[in-house]
């Protein structure tokens, strides 16, 4: 996660956040396991096959799906292709720069991608036009437009919502339009460690004072599909196990509220 | 994970294709101080993996705007040699190796006493010469030895191991076939003394029970792997003493 290199977070504020946490409270009044208010608008971009505008607290992203016909990978001739890219736009944060993806945005994209891929959300076997010759390539592109923490979950929510709503225009290969074959709804839940506490859906200030981040992506049936520990810092095995059960519980709620 | 999970990877007698039990590691060999120029180095051979690690630093961080006034920055660069895999790997960083470099840097920084070296940079070059599944963990395990070989103070070793699932069974230290056609992959790295987890990634499909089995297998293996790390370092120190270089 990018840090605010201008060091805006004062020591006083840091101390305040940590003291609040000791009493089980967060700076913005949330409980430790509470997500910020999320708003998802689907079909936000009419030119995309599917799209979603997501606000997670003050973090804002736009996800768009484009589907094109193309060649399959040589080692998977009977599968469509799914690819995920995340752009940290310079408008989103003072230290975000334009240019090719950096390690932070690549990490976010790959963790989002892993959750979608491993949960088998999209039936890529159903995306074959002509075996070994032509398949559908599904591009998930995400613009980060306002950054206030927890991009992994904001981007996963956006990508999943956009994919669920996506309609492929089949006319380019002489077929009828069809909805992307969706079989599962993965949800990621990201937590950070602050002192001895683990908090769900960190905002930027919480990310800045945290030591260790863990993302757990689960499927509808509550199984583990992807995990990623990130940033410097460490977790005990018990903390990881607790994070997993938190992800299952919180994820179930998010799925019911936003993705059903 | 792989495309097919119906390939038979465990025999009727419960053994894996290479004859291992579910909780067995492949053979691991580490040698410290294998390079002349680098401040520290190590070569690990783990199953069919051959990974070379060299360490430079702490040295002044460059470019200067990367300097941290409070601590050293740790830059691990994971790279696969063009000849390390069956089909030639195009040289240079791809998205996978950039992500791996990031999580390896973060894992190592969690163990190194970076606060002792403000404005400095510690470079850790991890070169996968021959890949055989579990390269990131092999590289990280060797990197800890190379950093110690460079004399850089650490809170603890960093020791990694992978577990996964094949044919619905949880197994330790996936082989290439198990990695390609398995159902889950869970690389973890731990500070062996405190048992703190500094790297954890997972993809595939695991239930909570399978996760518990996998992590206890890994934690059990970590002490064995750490022993090999320690032996590699003390062997190097003995050679240095005898040779008087």
Image (cartoon, coloured by chain):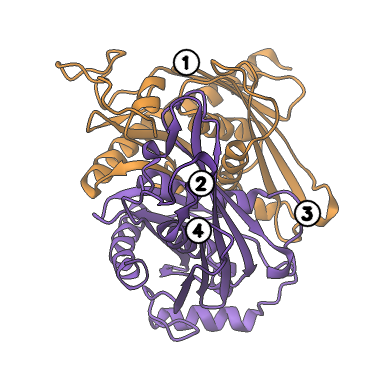
The residue tagged with tag 3: helix, strand or loop? Answer: helix
Determine if marks 1 and 4 fall on one subunit: no
- Mark 1 is surrounded, within 10 Å at the Cα level, by few (under 14), some (14 to 19) or many (20 or more) other residues, namely some
Q: In this view of the protein, which residue sits in the foreground, B231 or A225?
A: A225
Alpha-carbon distance for marks 3 and 2?
51 Å
- Mark 4 is surrounded, within 10 Å at the Cα level, by few (under 14), some (14 to 19) or many (20 or more) other residues, namely many
Alpha-carbon distance for marks 1 and 3?
37 Å
Alpha-carbon distance for marks 4 and 3?
21 Å
Identify the residue at image location x=54%, y=63%. Answer: A151
Numbered badge on residue B48? 1
Numbered badge on residue A212? 4
Write down the chain letter for disc 1. B
Residue corresponding to mark 2: A171
Q: Is residue A29 above or below residue A214?
A: below
Exactly how many numbered labels are in the figure? 4
Alpha-carbon distance for marks 2 and 1?
49 Å
User: Counting residues from the N terminus, which is met first, the one under dot 2 or under dot 4?
Assistant: 2
> Residue A58: x percent and y percent?
56, 78
Which chain identifier belongs to the orange chain?
B
């Amino acid at each position: 996660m990018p840090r605010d290199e201008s060091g805006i977070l004062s020591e006083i504020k840091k101390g305040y956040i940590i003291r609040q946490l000791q009493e089980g409270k967060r700076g913005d009044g949330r409980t430790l396991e509470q997500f910020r208010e999320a708003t998802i608008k689907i079909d936000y971009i009419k030119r995309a096959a599917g799209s979603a505008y997501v606000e997670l607290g003050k973090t804002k992203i736009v996800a768009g799906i484009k589907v094109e016909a193309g060649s399959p990978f040589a080692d998977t001739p009977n599968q469509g292709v799914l690819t995920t890219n995340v752009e940290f736009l310079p408008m989103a944060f003072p230290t975000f720069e334009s240019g090719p993806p950096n390690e932070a945005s690549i990490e976010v994209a790959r963790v989002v991608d892993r959750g979608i891929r491993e949960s088998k959300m999209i039936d890529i076997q159903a995306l074959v036009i002509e075996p070994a010759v032509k398949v559908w390539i599904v591009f998930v592109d995400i613009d980060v437009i306002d950054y206030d923490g927890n991009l992994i979950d904001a981007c996963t929510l956006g990508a999943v919502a956009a994919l669920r709503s996506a309609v492929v225009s089949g006319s380019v290969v002489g077929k009828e339009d069809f909805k992307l074959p969706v079989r599962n709804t993965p949800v990621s839940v990201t937590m950070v460690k602050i002192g001895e506490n683990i908090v769900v859906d960190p905002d930027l200030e919480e990310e800045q004072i945290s030591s260790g981040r863990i993302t757990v992506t689960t499927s509808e049936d509550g199984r583990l599909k992807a995990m990623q520990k990130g940033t410097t810092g460490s977790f005990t095995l018990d903390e990881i196990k607790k994070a997993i059960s938190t992800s299952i519980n919180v994820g179930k709620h998010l799925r019911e509220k936003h993705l059903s | 994970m792989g495309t097919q999970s119906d390939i038979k990877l465990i025999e009727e007698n419960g053994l894996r294709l290479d004859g291992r039990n579910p909780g067995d590691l492949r053979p691991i060999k580490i040698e410290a101080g294998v390079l002349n120029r680098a401040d520290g180095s190590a070569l690990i051979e783990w199953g069919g993996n051959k990974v070379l690690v060299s360490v430079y630093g702490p040295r002044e961080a460059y470019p200067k705007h990367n300097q941290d006034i409070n601590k050293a920055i740790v830059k691990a660069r994971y790279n696969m040699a063009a000849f390390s895999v069956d089909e030639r790997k195009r040289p240079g960083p791809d998205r996978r190796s950039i992500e791996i470099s990031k999580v390896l840097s973060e894992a190592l920084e969690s163990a190194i006493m970076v606060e002792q070296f403000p404005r400095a940079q510690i470079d850790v070059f991890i070169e996968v010469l021959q890949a055989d599944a579990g390269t990131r963990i092999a590289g990280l395990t060797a990197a800890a030895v190379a950093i110690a070989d460079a004399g850089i103070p650490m809170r603890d070793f960093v020791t990694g191991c992978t577990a996964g699932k094949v044919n619905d069974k949880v197994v330790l230290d996936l082989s290439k076939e198990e990695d390609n056609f398995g159902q889950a992959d869970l690389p973890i790295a731990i500070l062996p003394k405190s048992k703190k987890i500094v790297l954890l990634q997972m993809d595939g499909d695991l239930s909570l029970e399978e996760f518990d089995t996998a992590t206890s297998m890994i934690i059990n293996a970590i002490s064995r792997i750490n022993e090999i790390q320690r032996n590699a370092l003390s062997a190097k120190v003995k050679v240095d003493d005898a040779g008087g270089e």
